[in-house]
Image (cartoon, rainbow, N blue to C red):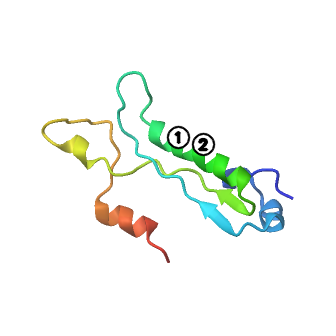
Amino acid sequence: MAKTVRYEELNTGDFVAAGFDKVIVPVGSCEAHGDHLPFGTDAMVAHDLALSVAERVPGTMVLPPTWFGMSHHYGTSRCACPSRISPRSRCSGTFFARS
């Protein structure tokens, strides 16, 4: 039986034996949060929260975080931040669309 809920730590046998029936996809933007925090703060917090939830909800697995989100406001003339990773809305919607 799997001792982890983290997808990246599983192998095929553990994955099948665990019988996961739910998955959490942590999403967080990579963007500036001032000089005191790393760019990946949003994704790191989302991933930690997802792991905490999955440990409490049986059958739940956590995928690695997606390191992009919606940071278009950083591209405006008011705040030009070259540190952001923000795909177009159409791309994000396609990525997260239910198949």
Q: Position of residue 24 (x, y in %)?
A: 59, 59
Q: Position of residue 29 (x, y in %)?
A: 40, 45
Identify the image quadrant of residue 22: bottom right
Q: Residues within 10 Å of mark 1 (few under 14, many from 20)?
A: some
- Residue 45 disc label: 1
Residue 3 versus residue 14 in the image, above or below: above
Residue lying farthest to the front in this orientation:
56
As helix, strand or loop, the secondary structure at mark 2 comes to: helix
- Nearer the observer, 68 or 61: 61
Q: Position of residue 54 (x, y in %)?
A: 68, 54
Circles 1, 2 touching at the beta carbon (< 8 Å): yes
Please indicate whether residue 48 sits to the left or right of residue 73 in the image. right
As helix, strand or loop, the secondary structure at mark 1 comes to: helix
Q: Residues within 10 Å of mark 2 (few under 14, many from 20)?
A: some
* Cα distance between the residues tagged 1 and 2: 5 Å
Identify the image quadrant of residue 19: bottom right
Residue type, numbered disc 1 = Val
Residue at coordinates 19% horizontally, 35% vertically from top-left? 79
Quadrant, the N terminus: bottom right
Residue lying farthest to the left in this orientation:
77
Residue type, numbered disc 2 = Asp
- Nearer the observer, 17 or 56: 56
Please indicate whether residue 46 sits to the left or right of residue 90 in the image. right
- Residue 48 disc label: 2
